[in-house]
Image (tube, rainbow, N blue to C red):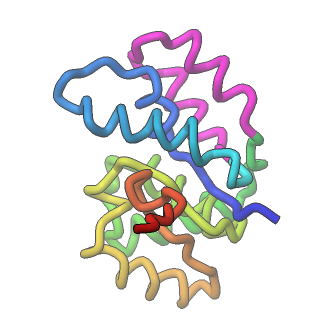
Amino acid sequence: MNRSLYLDSTIPSYLFDERESIKTYIEVTRNWWEEERKNFELWISEESIIEISKGDYPNKEKLIELISEIQVLLPDPRVFEIAQVYLDNYLMPRSLTGDAVHLAYASYYKLDFLLTWNCNHLANANKKQHILIINARMNLPTPEIITPLELFTETRHDN
């Protein structure tokens, strides 16, 4: 059975991004999408859909079409309660409630991974211990929060 993976809005949006400043991340995301996504059960949430729908993205129509093919986690009042606990415990800035909601969905639904390019508030080694403590207090598992760079299949190199 494939492991479960939550996509925040950065991952699908990078598939269609054209900014030169993040070209390497875009290429890694596209390579991951082509080579690795089939190895996972992909999920998004309404939060990701809302962020993408409201955002100013290149090729937005294609982006919306792409995310419409991904399974959507059902909203649950508990998810938003968990997100509030994250905000109350300063896991991320209160002005960025979406980050808290992404983590809450992945934790509440016990997904294996949260895939993101948000290295300030999610995929950040300095936050990992704090997230683990807060989730443990709520008796929640913590997904592995990573970037696509960390989620490629190991390749074997024979001499």
146 in relation to 110, above or below: above
Q: How many marks?
A: 0
The vertical placement of 34 against 74, above or below, is above
- Quarter holding the N terminus is bottom right
Q: Judge left or right: residue 71 versus residue 56.
A: right
Going by the picture, which residue comes out furthest to the left? 21
Q: Is residue 25 magenta?
A: no
Residue 138 as seen in the image, left or right of residue 59: right
Q: For this rendering, which residue is in front, 39 or 57?
A: 39
* Whole-percent x, y for residue 10 in the image: 43, 38
* Residue displayed at 48% across by 21% down: 54
Q: Nearer the viewer, residue 99 or 2?
A: 2
List the single residue furthest toward the right.
1
Q: Does the magenta portion include 50? A: yes
Residue 12 point in image, percent of width and height:
52, 33
Q: Position of residue 98 (x, y in %)?
A: 46, 47
Task: Name the residue: 31% across, 18% down.
Answer: 18
Work out whether 150 lies above or below 96.
below
Q: Tell me what residue is drawn at x 67 percent, y 66 percent.
A: 111
Is the stretch drawn in magenta largely helix, strand or loop? helix
Q: Residue drawn at (71%, 58%), measured in percent from left and top?
A: 77
On the rendered image, what quadrant is the C terminus found in?
Answer: bottom left
The stretch of residues the image draws in magenta is 43-70
| Residue furthest front as drawn | 159
